[in-house]
Amino acid sequence: MTHAWRMVARSHGGPEVIEREQFDPGAPAEHEVLIEQDAIGLNFIDTYYRTGLYPAPLPTPLGSESAGHIAAVGSGVTGLAVGDRVGCVSGLGAYATHRIVPADRVVKIPDTVSTEDAAAMMLKGMTACYLAEDSIALHAGHVALVHAAAGGVGSVLVPWLRDKGVVVIAHCGSAEKAARVNADHSLHGPFDKLSATVRELTGGKGVDVVYDGVGKDSWGASLASLKRRGLMVSYGNASGAVPPVSLLDLSDGGSLYVTRPKLFDYIATPEELAHTAERLFDHMARGVIKATIGQRFALADAAEAHRALEARATSGSTVLRP
């Protein structure tokens, strides 16, 4: 398949290390499918593999989230056929015109969802799903602080939580972004003043849970915003990795809990993947969440997309088009 090509990182570093190369994906083996891609989702985790924060062999095929239609199926595949529209958030290699993946790692896209919306929403939406539904048992009246609330995950997580009746305090990096977030309280400003504002809004108690995808810069503010026995969910490193943590800090903060989850531990089995996708597509069908695509880039311009993402110059989701 000489017309197939992909974007890879041949070394670790800035966006300039991303290169285009021709490749032959070959034919799908047993229990695999070949996807001809229509759209690819851009996510911060892609930058972690590019820089080497998350280890992977070089050259590293980038991207994990994509959607398209099945171009070929391997032997033993059931429930999927050529022409089916599918989405995938499995492994690496999404920055490509074609992609071979295990059949049990794809999900069918409902007729009500476009392939572009699926590519924009699957990883972020599934992340929001496990954060809101599986990382902690939340119910109406609980209070959550959501960092980067106008970003890819945050813009999905905020309405998902509010649909559950959770009171949401959103925090963004600018007044412009905060104005776009429909939360109970939408804040912006420096991290060193955040916890005081959160305490004021919660009558001095603090929040039940903090969802923090920012990392190093927000860590102190997040811990200081939690109520006694509150949960810190640190799921990303947009500003850099969180420094080493002293357990005494958690004790002094009020017997705090901390978890550092990742999506793939919540969709590790086909059943977990299907259940998470079902909940995501249900929320999309009910209009609770929607794919807000803030920008589109050509796949060949993936480096420019990475620059925009790391400069926090994006809002909502970003889609790459082959």
Image (cartoon, rainbow, N blue to C red):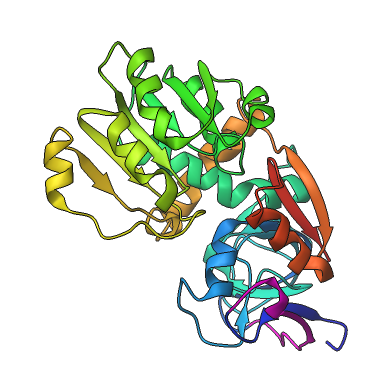
Q: Residue at x 53, y 30 (%)?
A: 189
Judge from the rendering whether residue 99 lies leftward or rightward of residue 1; answer left or right. left
Q: Is residue 48 above or below residue 167?
A: below
Q: Is residue 90 above or below residue 288?
A: below
Q: Residue at x 33, y 53 (%)?
A: 260
Which stretch is magenta? 13-28
Assess whether residue 228 is covered by the magenta stretch: no
The spot of residue 65 in percent (x, y) is: 63, 60
Q: Outermost residue toward the right?
A: 3
Front one among 234 and 245: 245
Please identify the quarter of the rendering in which residue 224 is found: top left
Please identify the quarter of the rendering in which residue 135 is found: top left
Q: Residue at x 57, y 52 (%)?
A: 123
The spot of residue 221 in percent (x, y) is: 36, 37
Front one among 80 and 18: 18
Q: Residue at x 74, y 73 (%)?
A: 96
The spot of residue 55 in percent (x, y) is: 45, 78
